Amino acid sequence: MGIQERLIEDVGLRRGVSRLTPEKIEKTVGAVLSGETGARLQAYSETCMRCGLCAEACHFALSHPGDPSYTPAGKVHQTMGVLLKTGGRVDPDFIYGMAQLAYTECNLCRRCVHFCPIGVDTAYIISVVRRICHKLGVTPQYIQDTAHSHSAVYNQMWVKDDEWTDSLMWQEDEAREEFPGLRIPLDKEGADIYYSVIAPEPKFRTQLIYQAAAILHMSGVDWTMPANPGWDNSDMCMFTGDFEMMGRLKRKHFESAQKLKVKRIVMGECGHALRSVYDVGNRWLGYSYPPVPVIHAVEFYWELIDQGRIKLAKKFPGPVTIQDPCNIVRGKGLQQKLREVTRFLVDGDIIEMHPNMEHNFCCAAGGGVINCGPPFKNVRLEGNVVKAEQLRATGVKTVITPCHNCHGGLHDIIHFNKLGMELKFLSDIIYECMEKPEA
Amino acid sequence: MNAAYEFVTGPLAWLAWGIFLLGSAWRLSSMYQLAKKKDAPSLSYMSWGFSLRSIVNWLVPFNALGWRKNPVMTVTTFAFHIGLILVPVFLMAHVALWTEFFGVSYATLPDSTADILTLVVLAACLVFAGRRLTQKEVAYITTGQDWLALVIVALPFLTGFLAYHQVFDYPVMLIAHIVAGEIMLAAIPFTRLSHMVFSAFTRAYMGSEFGGVRHARDW
């Protein structure tokens, strides 16, 4: 049992490992452990009583019953545990397995937090392992490609500067047929709202920008989108362990908002981006909390509904279920607002999955796992049998989830397990049901 | 035998308590210095309210999700730690020693209760050992350090029980018991037992981060 017995061929990992020597590994591990970690890692590694309670927490472990190498503590045991015990004196082949495990078998979802009496943060430990892998140059090819894109063009999907504004103007043009007078205001100084998205939206989910523009327009919101880099709030560098680049991305994002003197950043329906902007990236820059107030789309829609600014022509036919995205429930406590927004939009019951809210199971796509690409798709699907069972047990046809990763992950789970369910963003439903001008 | 008793209750006891108290203080202060130097972003989130919220919620049996999903371990852990603290501190014979040496006296446990609690602690140690041997997810991650901690904790209770019931040679067993207790005290700062010193802080940090940043329960 263990990662070495389930290695998957990946060009990025293979090439990275081929360049390693034991000396380089030892030096890099030592540099990260002594330079970038301290009391937190030491206390965790010393006080973890190896009680195994966390085995019950992890969807990977629950989906591989009888294989302890998938448990949170088991994963730390095979990675950081070995590095600490050997002082980094491990061979390159070990690094291959360590990287595969850290990037593809842990979603950094932090569900194990609810199971550890001591308060060990496994996601933090696995993040440090990823940091070491990044510094060793051993990262899966697909996610590294997105990290390269971030460093070249400040967005995740190689969207060029002119393609960005072009996509926005294209969506504006399209939408004006349905909503005369609609604008996607670019670089509007002093706007109330700076709307930011992840790069997959202009790249291949452009209708989400259309829908957001429609909702903001009909709600009479004073808003803007930036015309220049900084618009992408996503962050694969946070997940590869390239924290320097994460810092550059977040600085660009915050400064883009600050230059426009906006009151708040509203983020589209994405979980990991919230983690980066609200929780992790800001810390790297030295801000305990983001320097520009940041809210997630769920909070924003909740506010608009609360103020009576979203008017529905009809309700969406239920019943539905809700997939709680880890990064907005365990990351910002938005589970109640998500339900209140859903109740406002849906005519019919919300059939809950159990466990749910803060105790939800991850979609197995988050934490950069889906971004590691096709070689590791089955790791996610076989590693999340529990989610498939949860979904099936609801018996509903519609799953609402305000997170791109959850969409990607659940899409694959639904097809793989032939569940016949459809996935919706909140904005899909708001757009579909809201009052629209007479055409 | 008298000389041996004098030694283990005299110089050796001072040494064990010294290592325990000074060692714990040193570990705590050096860990705090390290945290200030390397984990400043983490320290900046520490909050009394959220720390206590987290600690209190985890101190209630079956309150945290992890407790609810592992009922056997919950009962065992709580029973074990309650016995582990109550028996050494409130045992009549121990309080008598405080009185004899320092003139200090306080409430005691009836011997019969202490006897039962001792058996509870030993039974819990057996459960812990059994889990390490038979439950795959525990066996997989168990190290020598974990066995060491378990043996160090079990021995004072085992020898104490045998001494109290005068099994084998009483004076020998008594001295073995005292030495075992002293080993445990001295081991606290430097083995897995250091979670006695550190876990309040790791718990507090998790509570602070979940309360202050993530606005979510961490239990």
Image: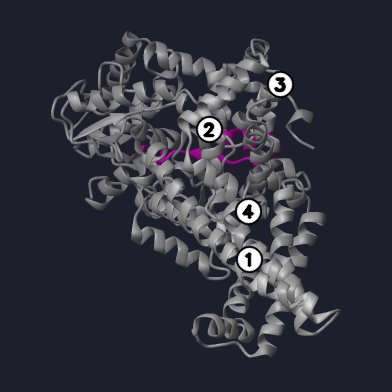
Q: Is residue A75 above or below residue A344?
A: above
Q: Considering the numbered disc 2 on the image, is that residue within a helix, a strand or a loop?
A: helix
Q: CA distance from mark 2 to mark 3?
A: 19 Å
- Asked whether residue B78 appears in the rendered view, the answer is yes
Question: Disc 4 marks which residue?
Answer: B192
Q: Residue at x 30, y 24 (%)?
A: A251
Of badges 4 and 3, the one in the foreground is: 4
Q: Nearer the viewer, residue B32 or A94?
A: B32
Quadrant location of the N terminus of chain A in the rendered image: top right
Mark sitting on residue A156: none
Does label 1 lie on the same chain as label 3?
no
Residue type at mark 4 is: Arg
- Could you give the CA–CA distance between mark 3 and mark 1, rounded to whole angstroms? 46 Å
Which amino acid type corresponds to the residue marked 2 in the rendered image? Val
Where B133 falls versus A154 (above or below)?
A: below
**Where, by quadrant of the figure, is residue A250 drawn?**
top left
Residue A266: % across, % down: 29, 36
- The residue indicated by pointer 1 is B12
Tell which circle, 2 or 3, labels the residue nearer the N-terminal end.
3
Q: Quadrant of residue B86?
A: bottom right
**Predominant secondary structure, magenta span:** helix
Near mark 1 (Cα within 10 A), the count class, few <14, some 14-19 or many ≥20, is some
